[in-house]
Image (spheres, rainbow, N blue to C red):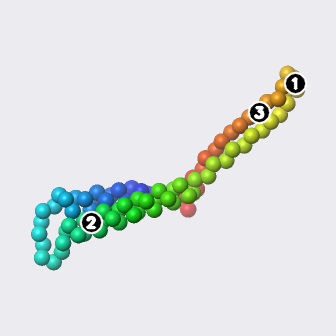
């Protein structure tokens, strides 16, 4: 969710900084655009860090002997979970 919010902030900031040509006395839209772009990039990076931090992978390997064929059988399973708070 924070990754999408970061992208939205960045896009709105880019629109304000580069596409809007309105001059107002009491507000500088270019500066607000640059601030929103920086905030969007920061939120995007924080979202990526939090997503990677919560990722866990677990590998289970089981070895058994097949009694009918008298062979060793190895099974390996890997599961990846992403716990969200």
Closer to the chain start, of discs 2 and 3, is 2
- Mark 3 packing: few (<14 Cα in 10 Å), some, or many (20+)? few
Vertical relation: 45 (above or below) 28: above
Which residue occupies 18% across, 72% down? Answer: 28
The Cα–Cα distance between marks 1 and 2, rounded to whole angstroms, is 69 Å
- Mark 2 packing: few (<14 Cα in 10 Å), some, or many (20+)? some
In the image, is 28 to the left or to the right of 12? left
Closer to the chain start, of discs 1 and 2, is 2
Q: Position of residue 29 (x, y in %)?
A: 19, 68
Answer yes or no: do the residues labelled 2 and 3 have beta carbons within 8 Å? no
Secondary structure category for the residue under label 1:
loop
Disc marking residue 6: none
- Which residue is denoted by mark 1 in the rendering? 70
Q: Position of residue 70 (x, y in %)?
A: 87, 24
Disc marking residue 74: 3
The label nearer to you, 2 versus 3, is 2
Q: Is residue 8 visible?
A: yes
Which residue occupies 29% across, 68% down? Answer: 35
Secondary structure category for the residue under label 2:
helix
- Indicate the quadrant where residue 60 lies: top right
Q: State the residue in front, 2 or 74.
A: 74
In the image, is 36 to the left or to the right of 84? left
The Cα–Cα distance between marks 2 and 3, rounded to whole angstroms, is 57 Å
So how many labels did they put on this image?
3
The Cα–Cα distance between marks 1 and 3, rounded to whole angstroms, is 13 Å
Vertical relation: 7 (above or below) 58: below
In the image, is 33 to the left or to the right of 23? right
Q: Position of residue 18 (x, y in %)?
A: 19, 59
- Which residue is denoted by mark 2 in the rendering? 34
Which residue occupies 26% across, 62% down? Answer: 13
The N terminus: image quadrant:
bottom left
């Amino acid at each position: 969710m924070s990754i999408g919010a970061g992208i939205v902030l960045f896009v709105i900031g880019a629109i304000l900084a580069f596409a809007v040509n309105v001059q107002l006395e009491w507000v500088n839209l270019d500066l607000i655009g640059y601030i929103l772009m920086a905030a969007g990039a920061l939120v995007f990076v924080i979202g990526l860090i939090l997503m990677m931090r919560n990722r866990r992978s677990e590998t289970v390997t089981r070895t058994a002997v097949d009694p009918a064929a008298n062979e060793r059988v190895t099974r390996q399973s890997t599961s990846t979970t992403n716990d969200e708070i």
